[in-house]
Image (tube, rainbow, N blue to C red):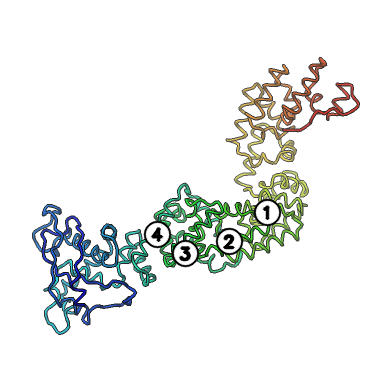
Amino acid sequence: MAAMASFFFPIPTINGCTKSSPLIPLHRFILPQSPSFFPLNFRPFSSRFHSFLASSHFVPFASTSSDALPFSDGPPEKDPLHSLAEARLAVSEYLQRFGVSEDESVSIASNSPRFLKMLVDGVRELDETSMWISWSKEGEEQPLADDFGFKEKVALMAMEKGDYGKVAFLESVGMNLSSAMNVARYLSGEMLPSLIYKVKYMKELFSSGSGDGKLLGKCARRMMTNLSIPPDDDVQQTLSFFEKIEARRGGLDMLSSNEESFRLLLESFPRMLLLSVESHVKPMVEFLENIDIPKERMRSIFLLFPPVIFFNAEVLKSRILAFEEVGIEVTVVGKLLLKYPWITANCIQGNLKQIVSFFELEKVPNASIINAISSWPLILGSSTSKLQLMVDRFGGLGVRSKKLGQVIATSPQILLQKPQEFLQVISFFEEIGFDKESVGRIITRCPEVSATSVEKTLKRKLEFLISIGISKTHLPRAIRKYPELLVSDPDKTLLPRIRYLRQRGLSERDIAFMVGRFSPLLGYTIEEVLRPKLDFLVNIMEKPIKEVVDYPRYFSYSLEKKIIPRFRVLKAMNVECSLKDMLGKNDEEFAVEFMGYKGTKHLSSSPT
């Protein structure tokens, strides 16, 4: 200890730390060099600090202008600003003894106010209660307070905490004092410079991401809502993490904040700070980049499934290969990980095989299975017994095997719908005149209609169709031909198209009549279908716009492949006919009637 006491080191300057430059006994700041040599409850003195008073080496203390802070000429203990500056300097020096740079130590000391307050309050409490006698040298009666200054007492108090600077550092990165102390105990064997490096690397990884908005919170809620298989430890830890965040102010939307989410992750998974950056984290990052996951998006993966960071690259690779075995490409899996990284959990891997086997037994085409999993991987968190309930409901409507594959390939989310909600949709269609077989055909054509709310969507769309003039007797026909009307947005799609047709000279009654006869009319876009075909009708064919009222199916034919070729044939032959006669016949019938051919002429009948 005598050799250590003669060691001189630079003391950083913190503005406003002192009013003068007193001589401070350096040996009183000799601290343990590495926590690896001292246990967490290490005490350097037999009576707290028995050997720090052995010599009288002094160094000049860093000084600042007397105008740096508006403190009084009284003792530091009586001046709060002076006490705080002294405490910051003491903590800064304390941190430097563990290998922390001067700039870093000043930053940590300046951003750990609660830790500083704890130290200052501890010193003041011992001063006020005259308890420093218990901190005296062994065999001496004079209290330590008579020999040590305020800053020295703060330094000794920090050392007495036994965390080797980790609590101050963890508070400086955003943790509250209680969490910082808990995490510091977990990381008791970690060197402070190593810990700082790890946190900086991880924080940089998290800060590089942007644009997630509230997407992360939405994805987390979906996982919590749709998981119905027994979770393994990794999934359970993730769910507990989400539940803990959901209970706080701001809920799961806090995941969209880089600072908040990083802090919450460290508090819940401090073990990540025991991982080697060089041999574990960086290889993981490199692997994710190799499957087309950009570095700035990786925070999504770590936040939505924190245990994934404990997988090594080889384990993660083997979990991804499981998806390749069922036909899902690695690049597709990479995209799925951005929203559903928990699909790499062990329990999900086992369920993947069960779900594929389940659909194969239902004679669902493999391509449909792959599309369903790729577009809605939440079904991997569902038990096959739950899926069976919905498959049976579809079976009752005649939707099986290939038809079922068609449904789940385009709208796999309906498999996770509650059976009672699905039955409400079926009852809705039956009430307006459809039998079960017709309902099955409607759902096969437009699967998403079965996942919509009866009260909020279906009934309102029905009211809208009636409001634009479609009679109740014509409603079933309109819906049967184009059930997409029930899932189209009136304000963004239907009404703009109706207004455009009105502008072109059609009345409300004309439009209602056209929709009643050919409901897909309102499914055509203005710029790509309605405008060019009406322009050709009026400007080139020189027909009145009212002709489309009698034959609204005109809009279903390809302008380039059918309308223009047939018009040219009729014009060359100087033949006038209705739109129905011109377009309603197939190529052979058209050739026989208008061209005198008995064979088939190559005039395509491809619709738009």
Along the line of sight, which residue is nearer the eye, 407 or 29?
Answer: 29
Q: Which residue is mark 2?
A: 317
Name the mark nearer the viewer: 2 or 4.
2
Q: Which residue is mark 3?
A: 279
Residue 152 horizontal/vertical position (percent): 18, 69
For the residue labelled by badge 3, is the local secondary structure a helix, a strand or a loop?
Answer: helix
Give the residue displayed 32% in from the left and 73% down from the top: 35
Q: Earlier in the sequence, mark 1 or mark 4?
A: 4
- Alpha-carbon distance for marks 2 and 4? 28 Å
Q: Earlier in the sequence, mark 2 or mark 4?
A: 4
Type of amino acid at the residue the image marks with label 2: Lys
Left or right of 70 on screen, residue 218: right
Residue 282 horizontal/vertical position (percent): 47, 59
Task: Find the residue positioned furthest to the left.
Answer: 73
Residue 140 vertical position relative to residue 246 in the rendered view, above or below? below
Left or right of 167 on screen, residue 69: left
Name the mark nearer the viewer: 3 or 1.
3
Task: Find the residue positioned furthest to the top.
Answer: 574
Type of amino acid at the residue the image marks with label 1: Ile
Q: Which residue is mark 4?
A: 263
Residue 386 vertical position relative to residue 34 in the rendered view, above or below? above
Q: How many marks are shown on the rendered structure?
A: 4
Residue 60 horizontal/vertical position (percent): 13, 63
Q: Quadrant of residue 373?
A: bottom right
Q: Which residue is mark 1?
A: 370
- Alpha-carbon distance for marks 3 and 4? 23 Å
- Alpha-carbon distance for marks 1 and 4? 37 Å
- Alpha-carbon distance for marks 2 and 3? 16 Å
- Alpha-carbon distance for marks 3 and 1? 35 Å
Type of amino acid at the residue the image marks with label 4: Arg
Residue 134 horizontal/vertical position (percent): 18, 79
In the picture, which quadrant includes the N terminus?
A: bottom left
